[in-house]
Image (tube, grey):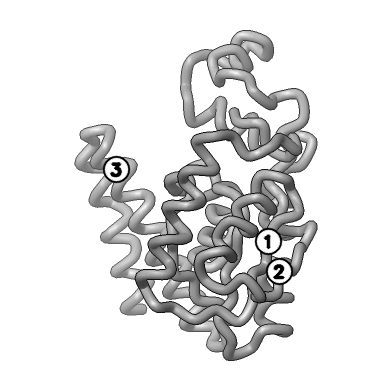
């Protein structure tokens, strides 16, 4: 488990990665109207370095809702340590689930906070390009909130973690049609369930969700 909302400085590796990202964005010739950053020191430092490459006069706004998740007493501990302390056994999915539901900030609270941050960006920066500088958890929370309409926070532990200083195009949009909402949510759930079955070499577990999905889709 990482340090979460511990406000540590950007280290030498992070500084080098920020310069690399700034150069990459400059080469892409992408125009940004503003930078919206987490107020944590490592994110602020990254935003300032990137601004040197894309526009030294660009507006930088800090939003506290973009901060990393607060893992509380789990910070900097290995999952095996947490499992031993709480008698959880050796099932990694169950251990991760325990961490996300029992941290100082639960996964549900975290995803809700990140949703508010991006809703604010949409409302205030409509039709503008904003560069969001935040954290891996922030990215994952936004991803699951867009992919899943129901209980998105329970998908957080399974969402892939992006590489440090990676660049991702993120579209901010709202679901308006209830049927579209349902299809998107069920399709993403199907993908997750099938992948889990395939990874465990359980053909039945991988194929049963497909049959159920097709029945729901055609009825």
Q: Is residue 60 above or below residue 175?
A: above
Tag in front: 2 or 3:
2
Residue beneath the point at 64% across and 88% down: 126
Percent across and percent down for residue 178 are: 55, 83
Residue found at the very far bottom of the displayed protein: 127
Relative to 85, 64 lies left or right: right
Residue beneath the point at 69% across and 26% down: 75
Relative to 147, 193 lies left or right: left
- Residue corresponding to mark 1: 37
Q: Secondary structure at mark 1?
A: strand
- Residue corresponding to mark 3: 205
Residue beneath the point at 34% across and 65% down: 213
Which of the pair 71/95 is nearer the observer?
A: 71
Specify which label sits upstream in the sequence, 1 or 3: 1
How many residues crowd around disc 1 within 10 Å: few (fewer than 14), some, or many (20 or more)? many
Task: Quadrant for the C terminus, please.
Answer: bottom left
How many residues crowd around disc 2 within 10 Å: few (fewer than 14), some, or many (20 or more)? some
- Residue corresponding to mark 2: 60
Specify which label sits upstream in the sequence, 2 or 1: 1
Percent across and percent down for residue 200 are: 27, 33
Which of the pair 3/200 is nearer the observer?
A: 3
Which of the pair 139/99 is nearer the observer?
A: 139
Task: Quadrant for the N terminus, please.
Answer: top right
Calculate the distance from the C-alpha at mark 1 to the C-alpha at mark 3: 41 Å
Q: Secondary structure at mark 2?
A: strand
């Amino acid at each position: 488990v990482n340090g979460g909302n511990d406000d540590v400085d950007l280290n030498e590796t992070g500084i080098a990665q920020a310069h690399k990202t700034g150069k990459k964005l400059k080469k892409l010739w992408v125009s940004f109207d503003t930078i919206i950053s987490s107020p944590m020191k490592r994110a602020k430092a990254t935003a300032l370095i990137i601004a040197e490459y894309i526009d030294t006069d660009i507006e930088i706004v800090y939003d506290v809702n973009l901060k990393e998740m607060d893992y509380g007493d789990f910070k900097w501990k290995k999952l095996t340590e947490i499992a031993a302390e709480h008698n959880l056994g050796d099932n990694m999915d169950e251990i991760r689930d325990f961490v996300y539901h029992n941290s100082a900030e639960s996964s549900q609270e975290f995803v809700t906070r990140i949703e508010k941050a991006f809703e604010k960006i949409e409302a205030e920066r409509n039709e503008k390009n904003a560069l969001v500088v935040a954290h891996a958890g922030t990215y994952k929370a936004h991803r699951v909130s867009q992919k899943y309409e129901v209980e998105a926070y329970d998908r957080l532990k399974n969402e892939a973690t992006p590489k440090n200083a990676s660049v991702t195009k993120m579209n901010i949009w709202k679901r308006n049609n209830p049927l579209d909402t349902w299809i998107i949510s069920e399709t993403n759930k199907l993908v997750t369930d099938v992948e889990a079955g395939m990874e465990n070499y359980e053909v039945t577990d991988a194929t049963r969700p497909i049959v159920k999905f097709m029945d729901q889709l055609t009825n």
